[in-house]
Every structure is written in structure tokens, then in C-alpha cells.
Image: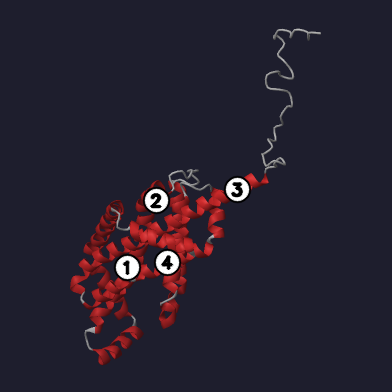
Amino acid sequence: MTRLLDAFWRAAAYCLHPKVIGLSLLPLLIGVALTLGGGWFYWEAAVAGVRATLESWQLVDAGLKWVETLVGASFRSVLAPLIVVGLVAPVIVLLSVLLVAWLMTPAIVNLVAARRFPRLERKQGAGFISSLFWSVACTLLALLALVVSLPLWFIPPLVLVLPPLIWGWLNYRVMSFDVLAAHASPQERRRLMQAHHMPLLGIGVVSGYLGAAPSLLWAASAMTLVFAPLLIVVSVWLYTLVFGFSALWFAHYGLSALAAMRAEAAEAADAARPQAPGGEVIEMGGTSSAPASQPLFPPPNAPALPPPTP
């Protein structure tokens, strides 16, 4: 728990570092460009398609007419944009996670390692291709979990639990792998992720709840759709900051745990080496009792020693 809290406060302080602030701009610019570009070209078509789909289902159309008698005729015009926003929000979250993992995390790990662990050996346990494959595989599993659990979201308590848990699991798997990719060997990474499973998952879940905070802006955009483009930009920026903080938290905790694990392994190796009664370590290669000035087996070309004087 001490290491977890220490990593939390260090990650919060590092968020004010100029380099971290600068690094957060690149994923933000890419995410905003993709989001606004998609909204510019496909927003109206997506809303019209959802509205036409809802009206084509007789049962849904009858339900909409009944709801309009209760809340007003404007409900139908708001529902379609709400559904589009609800479908786009998970895509933006996934995009933010992947952009932070691929663009920010390596630079953040280098920053933390240079300032806190300059002597920590880099064993290059995984490269970019391995990290990319791992991120895509975990993302597909998270999407599958979202689709399978979607009917449970209509139960009020579960909608507040299941999405953050899924995002937390995704953060835990992706960020833990990326922050240890350069410094830990594959064996060390697997051992550390298994030994520190619960703290790392806790970091991921907390980050998942923090990542759910920008979703409040989507609710605001549903009520004031005129400001939707601006709110989309702000949401992407908040997602980037949240996952940047998550990467810092994982980096501080993961590298600290790796350094501690290697120190414990070194101490165990030293303790396992046999020692002489005086406390000196015995070299397993063996030593000779002959003096150093007179070798036990002199080379063949060495001059003969004079006979002892009587």
C-alpha cells in the first residue's frame, strides 16, 4: 500500500512537468483531428440512420410516441444524437488509451527511469511489435466484454460498476505491459504482473473511474448539441490527461516494484553463496595454498631455483 500511494502522489506531481504536458498534446491533436473529421463527414448521416432505424421498428416507434406524450415532442429529436454519442464514446476512450500507450507511455517511462531509476538495467523484454499485438488483443477482449455485458447496463447499479471495471482491466493489461517492456525481461514481467496483480488492477480500476468522468460532458452535449464539437475536443483532452496520469502511476509503481524485485533476488543470491567461518565468501572456483610468489606448477621455461644453502 505504501508503494501504491507513493506512486500515486509522484504521478500527480509529474503531471505538472512541462515534458508531460507537452507529450499530452500529440495524442490530443491526433484524437481531435480524427474525432472532428469523423463528426464533420458522418455526424448527420449517422443521426439520420439511427432515426430511420428507430422509426422502422413498429414496437420502438410506438414506445417513442408514448414517451413523447409524457416528456414532449422533442424527445424523438434528442434520442438519435444520444444513441450516436453513446456509441462513439467507447470508441473515443479506446482511441485515447491506444494513443497514450503508443505515443506517451514510452516517453513517460524514460522520464521516470531517468529521474528515479537511472541505474535500472534495460533488458528489452518486448519491442514495439509485441506491444502493438498485446494492446490490440487486450482491446478486442475489452470490446467483447462490453458487447456481452451491454444488456446489464440497463440495471442501474451495474452500469456504474461494469464499464469502469472493463476499462480498468484494459488499463491494467496494456499499461503494465508497456511500462515494463523496456526494462524487464519476459520472465520478470510475467512474475511481477502475477505478484502485483491486485495493486496493478486497482490502479487500472481507479483510472477507469477517472476515465468515466469526461462522460458527463457527453450528457451535456446531449442537452446542448450546438456545443457538441467543442465538448468533443474537451472530452478527448480530458481522456488524454486521465490516461497520461494512469501511465505515470503505472510507471512509478512498476519500475519501483521491478527495482525491489531485483534487489531481493541479488540479496538472495548473495545469501545462497557459501561463506567461510570468518564471514568471507568462498569462491567456488577453488584456490591454492601455495604462496603467490612461488607458483605450485612453474612454467616449463622458468629458470631452476638454486638449491638450498646448507
Q: Are marks 2 and 3 in contact (CB under 8 Å)?
A: no
The residue type indicated by label 4 comes to Trp
The residue identified by callout 1 is: 88
Q: Identify the mark nearer the N-term, 3 or 4.
A: 4
| Numbered disc in front, either 2 or 3 | 3
Q: Residue furthest left?
A: 226
The residue identified by callout 3 is: 267
- Label annotation for residue 125: none
The residue identified by callout 2 is: 112
Q: CA distance from mark 2 to mark 3?
A: 25 Å
Q: Residue at x 43, y 58 (%)?
A: 250
Q: CA distance from mark 4 to mark 2?
A: 24 Å
Please provide percent x and percent y for residue 12. Answer: 35, 61
Q: Residue at x 70, y 9 (%)?
A: 302
Q: Residue furthest bottom?
A: 69
Q: Residue at x 32, y 64 (%)?
A: 239
| Numbered disc in front, either 3 or 1 | 3
The residue identified by callout 4 is: 167
Q: Residue at x 24, y 64 (%)?
A: 233
Q: Nearer the viewer, residue 27 or 224?
A: 27
